[in-house]
Amino acid sequence: MMKRVIAVLLILAVAVSAARPKWHQLKGYSFERYVSDFGRRYERGTDEYALREATFNKQLAKIHAHNAEPSNTWRMGVNQFTDMTPQEWKKYNAAFKSPNRPAPARVQASTAAPLPKTVDYRTWTSPRVLTDVKHQGSCGSCWAHSATESMESYYALLTGMLPVLSVQQLTSCVPYGCAGCDGGDATLAYYYIQNTYYGQTEEWAYSYKDFFFNERNPNATTSACLNVTDMFPNHTPYHWFADLNRVGCTGYVAITPNSAQATMEALATTGPLSISVAAGNWQNYEAGVMQNNASNGQDNEWGIDHDVQMVGYGHDAELGMDYWIVRNSWSTLWGEYGYVRLARPAVEPCSPDGSVCGTSGCLNDPHFPLVKENPPQPF
């Protein structure tokens, strides 16, 4: 019995030692170890290997320098992006505010109402309003992920049901100037859903195909839009139980931009929010309350390029800091299990012209969809 216990402990020890390192375990960490830990297939002696090694070493030096600064309230670590070049990183974050954006159904302003100290939709169970953290892969479809996440959340708030909806449908089918894996605007996704007969379908019926979209391939294209109904014609005897959930939309509500009070009120009284952020400095985030200011933000501080979902706010007693809770679409292996906490100071930082406010510009464009329940579609 004792031998079996020792064997199990040895297996666990090996598993722990082989795990990807956390920020405080990077002393002596090397590119060779990174290649092994992250399953890279770079071939020694090639230009690709040399490029990735140089990129990694530069990022690792930045990570060490950041973590050595005691005043920093957040930590950097190695992750799936550490060997990505600055050019690749900039292209990966592809959200934009389209000139074709439709006007919101209304703008929700602050009423200066008293608010709870903490709101965290990750803890909601009656109903549950957040699906699991998603992963956009190598496709710049953050805008479609953000829109889908909010469609899911508001459908759950409306009906108590939380289907996983199709990101690929939005990535492939939204027109009006959206470019699929090359970028888009979440509000145009709502407009598309509003103008379709069936609405947004479920993930299982229209699964995510563009995870392996390769931005380094100049010939890469987003998957073509499909008519899912045609893919599932009625078949006897299956039609009697085969219903496909469809979620509709009648527009969207914009929250007064750059207003922390209005954003907090919307989170506390309405639900999670789709937001746009400047993610230029998110590449190496691992944990803590992120501050993105002039000392570390550089030209990325106000450069809006990424759509995500804000799911609450709170206070870190140890750091003595307030924060926003933001859900990302880079898998649970990034950040705090797929989330980032952004600093929420008493006076929110703003760009020099005042057009973008909040840490990483998180307050510049909060909004949420007006969801409706479409009849299930037999197929």
Image (spheres, helix red, strand yellow):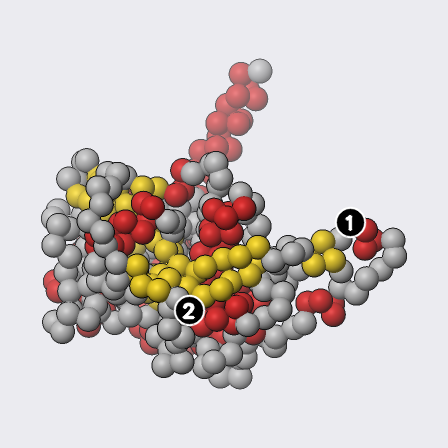
Q: Is residue 86 left or right of residue 70?
A: right
Per the image, label 2 sits on a secondary structure element best described as helix
Based on the displayed image, in which of its 4 quarters is residue 304 positioned? bottom left
Which corner quadrant of the image does residue 47 belong to? bottom left
Picture disc at residue 363: none
Residue at left offset 47%, top offset 52%: 154
Tag 2: residue type? Thr
Q: CA distance from mark 2 to mark 1?
A: 34 Å
Quadrant of the image for the C terminus? bottom right
- State whether residue 283 is above or below residue 48: above
Q: Position of residue 238 (x, y in %)?
A: 83, 53
Q: Is residue 304 left or right of residue 234?
A: left
- Residue 33 in percent (x, y) is at 39, 54
Residue 251, compared with residue 243, is above or below; it is below
**Which structural element holds mark 1?**
loop
What residue did someone put label 2 on? 187
Q: Is residue 105 visible?
A: yes
Q: Residue at x 43, y 44 (%)?
A: 19
For the point 52% across and 72% down, the residue is: 192
Determine crowd level at label 2: few under 14, some 14-19, many 20+ residues with C-alpha closer than 10 A. Answer: many
Mark 1 lies on residue: 241
Q: Nearer the viewer, residue 153 or 55?
A: 153
